[in-house]
Image (cartoon, rainbow, N blue to C red):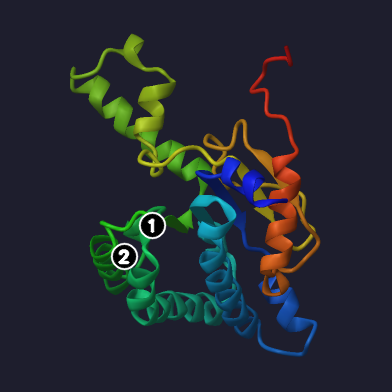
Amino acid sequence: MNTADRKALRGLHVAIIMDGNGRWAQSRGLPRLMGHREGVRRLKEVVRACPDLGVQYLTVYAFSTENWRRSRREVTGLMSMFARSIRREARELLKQGVRMRFVGDRTGLSPVLQDLFAWIEDLTAGNTRLHMTVAINYGGRDELVRATRAICAAVAAGTLRPEAVNEELIAAQLDTRDLPDPDLVIRTSGEVRSSNFLPWQSAYSEFEFTPVLWPEFTRAEFETILDAYGLRERRFGGVTA
């Protein structure tokens, strides 16, 4: 894709299900956490590439509400990795103009991690070059349940009429209320499902499933997928004139 075409893609919101870290490590006889560490390196590469490739919003699935079922060692290691990455990358994120956000149920996370989320969000709040959102302890159904409870509470309190509930009001209660819906959702590792990731927001997103494991996902692979996306026709339920 040439420079002019890339300019036409400016403002894209890409969401990524970063899958395959554990399998990548196990195929090499390594502990699963080594795959997650390699996955962090790939994420840094993608973050650096986004502004040049027309991506203004990047949302990544880091830890789902179902991932608590994994071994205690892996879960503990992931939580430590999240905290360490925030501390280590803060200066670089500022330098690159990246604004950080986190979505998901924070009440299920440690106070230390919750404080780090709030700190990095506040630190990078003025950045606009790339809006990066990390989904941790996130599940789409859980998000919709929390949003529904908030709406029900408002109705019960008499501050909201039931007939006033519409798509816009529901969207305003979601974790992603300050973000546009994703234009493109990418899943790595060959799995062909969305795994409870942004079900409301991705209703009209384009999807791309690649067999590449996340630790092997390069800038070149990212560019290839974006080039293919640029050739798609998005009709949002309509028809071509």
**Residue 207 screen position, x and y as percent:** 70, 43
* Rendering quarter of residue 174: top left
Mark 2, Cα crowd under 10 Å, few <14 / some 14-19 / many 20+, is many
Q: Secondary structure at mark 2?
A: helix
The residue shown at (30%, 33%) is: 150
Find disc 2 in the rendering and name its residue: 117
Q: Which residue is mark 1?
A: 102
Q: Is residue 87 visible?
A: yes
**Vertical placement of residue 155 versus 65, above or below:** above
Q: Are marks 1 and 2 in contact (CB under 8 Å)?
A: yes
| Mark positioned earlier in the residue sequence (1 or 2) | 1
Q: Is residue 113 above or below residue 240?
A: below
Residue at 54 percent of width and 43 percent of height: 198
Identify the image quadrant of residue 235: top right
Q: Nearer the viewer, residue 202 or 30?
A: 202
Give the camera-side residue of 168 and 64: 168
Q: Position of residue 131 (x, y in %)?
A: 41, 54
Q: Amino acid at mark 2?
A: Phe
Disc marking residue 141: none
Q: Residue at x 29, y 70 (%)?
A: 116
Amino acid carrying label 1: it is Phe
